[in-house]
Amino acid sequence: MGIRNVVLLSHQGAGKTSLAESMLFSAGAIQRLGSVEEGTTTSDYDPIEIERHIGINLSLLPFEWKETRVNLIDTPGYADFTSEVKSGLRVTEGAVIVVCAASGVEIGTEQMWAAVERLGLPCLLFVNKMDRDNTDFYNTLGQIQKKLGKKCLPAQLPIGAQSDLRGVVDLITMKSYFGFPVEEKEIPSELEEKAASFREKLIEAAVEIDDALISKYLEGETISDEEIFGAVKQATLSGKLVPVFAGSALRGIGTQSLLDAIHHYLLSPEETTIIATNSTGEKEVVRPSIDSPLTSLVFKTTADPYVGKLSYFRVYSGVISSNSQVWNANKRGMEHIGQLFTLLGKNQQPVSQLGAGDMGAVARLNLTTICDTLCAPEHSVVLAGIDFPKANFSMAVYPRTKTDLDKMSTVLSRISEEDPSLQMRRDPDTNEFIISGIGDNQLDIIKEKMRRKFGVDVRLDLPRVPYKETITIATKAEYKHKKQSGGHGQYGHVFLELTPLPKGGGFEFAEKIFGGAIPQNYIPAVEKGVNETKQEGILAGYPVTDLKVTLYDGSFHSVDSSDIAFKIAASQALKKGLSQGQSVLLEPIMNLVIIVPEACTGDVISDLNTKRGRVLGMSPAADYSEGGEESSGRMVIKAQAPCAELLRYTIDLRALTQGRGDFVMEFDHYEEVPSHISQKVIAAQKEHQKSA
Ligand code: GDP
């Protein structure tokens, strides 16, 4: 049986999940058609997905259609979950992009299109929701051709429209397919002319791929349906043609024809070339056959508190068997494979083996994480991993109770295993626990998962900015700590010199005591006092930096002096010195590289101005797509802006560019906070300390 691995892509809400459900039902893989509204689809089974009516995870939906096993991967449409899309794209040989007939080509459609083009993945388009009011196939087609390119050509036409949608005409077989289940009939007479003209366009584009067929076509010879199928397939695989289909996922119209198209036009895994890196670092070709040694790639893992870790994998060559040992080429260790199964959404079907081209899952792998290659021990190769998007949006995590605190980091590291775009760290400056991801929706869902799946309750807040403090002028400060009334006295006396260091100079302590003004054994106590005090500056408790403190004089008392007395004296002297040295707050300044459509450049720049940003340069971006008349023309803006203004930049840039912008941000240097802002920061920090 042949295999087709297909990823389903679209802008959020175009109907992927409904279409997947309709395909599963048509193929007999499910007996009851689920609905998104009722939360009963096979693809979106997670309670969070059901509640929010959105997909957040990719789901693996295998079924059989006319002697072909289709592994359909349904993906989430929201930008926050692009990691799932990347995984889906990595392990499939073809894509179906769903376009909503009512909304047309949306931002998400363009983004999915660009991703498919970049990878050179053969693609079919499905214009869905043709049953809805105010939809017109030819309008949507016009928009598709304008925005995505003229190579998008109908392979089918709808019969009837809106509430009267009845079926589709196939432009190759020139038959009509009505209703659900499908009934084959002749083309309605009113569509004959239109169908002939669109068929002509499709054939013209398809035969271009084959010289012999072109001459046959030009000489007016008949070309068989088989030849046309073959030519459309070749043109689709080479990216010269993107066949367009139409229908309604809810009414099951067009679904079966789309399934036929997947079978006819998309690649079988056996037809692909797979390149891997062997143990000597050289590239080698892996033959995608069951007779080759095993190579497989883990493309998703899920963490479940009860079943444990589940790893989804795609087999590229050879066979993987239940209860066997395989070699993890990335971790360089043997891994035990327990019971293998195939998945249909959440339902697991145990299987004894899975062969080249197929996909499945296995529970509780020890060593293995996402993107690892599992292979035959005697033939170690590594397959290319998945290029996950960069985590740009951060939040600080605050546990609600002591128990939540204890469990928090373990649970987060389990969750981050299933979401590779998630990163975690403790900020050494603010001491906050920070999680970073693609966007606010994603982090919100992480919080929800922590609570529902693992019973850990946390609050998310924008991270605190790691301000610092430094002095602006050199100064000297003296402090004498003296308590000599009654009992054992205390005596410590120091003179400190405070000198500003250049930006990024950090902190230094030195001593130049002459003639034993302070005995050597008290100097470590002075240094300790200075070090402790510089952790919390005098303005708002932020650490002091870019400062050299020199102990150059002092005095002691042979009986009353002690380490503690010198520590106190040093601490007080430093505080005095910071105040005399006119200390100021410093803030982190970030480097930004922003890529936006040219039309948004003005808005993005004026927004940067309101964020105290500085534009350093602007240049046209390398073109990222072909064909579409409106999809090129992106600009790269290089800029710097304070971290404090950029905490929500992911969200702001999305709003400014309707989701078309992208950016990377990294810390560059610290700079003095302008005084009017500094006052606000200090006031806010005092408020925070009061409430803490
Ligand atoms: P996804 O986000 O791309 O997976 O889209 P869904 O399958 O969740 O569908 C989004 C919404 O569109 C749901 O309310 C569906 O019921 C609705 N929908 C999906 N397909 C159709 C269709 O063919 N016709 C109509 N009228 N509504 C549809």
Image (cartoon, rainbow, N blue to C red):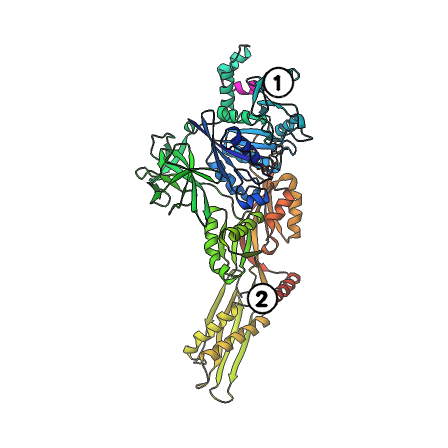
Regarding mark 2 in the picture, which secondary structure is present there?
Answer: loop
The kind of residue on which mark 1 rests is Ala
Indicate which disc residue 692 carries.
2
- Left or right? Give the position of 78 relative to 512: right
Work out how far the residue at label 2 is from the one at label 1, CA to CA, in angstroms: 72 Å
Asked whether residue 238 is in view, the answer is no
Q: Residue at x 53, y 20 (%)?
A: 206
Asked whether residue 145 is in view, the answer is yes
What's the magenta region?
196-210
Name above or below for residue 623 compared with residue 514: above
Q: Quadrant of the C terminus?
A: bottom right
Extreme residue toward the left, this view: 378
In the rendered image, residue 430, in percent from the top left (x then y), is placed at 53, 61
Q: Are marks 2 and 1 in contact (CB under 8 Å)?
A: no
The kind of residue on which mark 2 rests is Ala
Mark 1 within 8 Å of ligand 1, using the beta carbon: no
Q: Quadrant of ligand 1?
A: top right
Instruction: Report crowding for label 1: few under 14, some 14 to 19, many 20 or more residues within 10 A (C-alpha).
Output: many
- Find disc 1 in the rendering and name its residue: 195
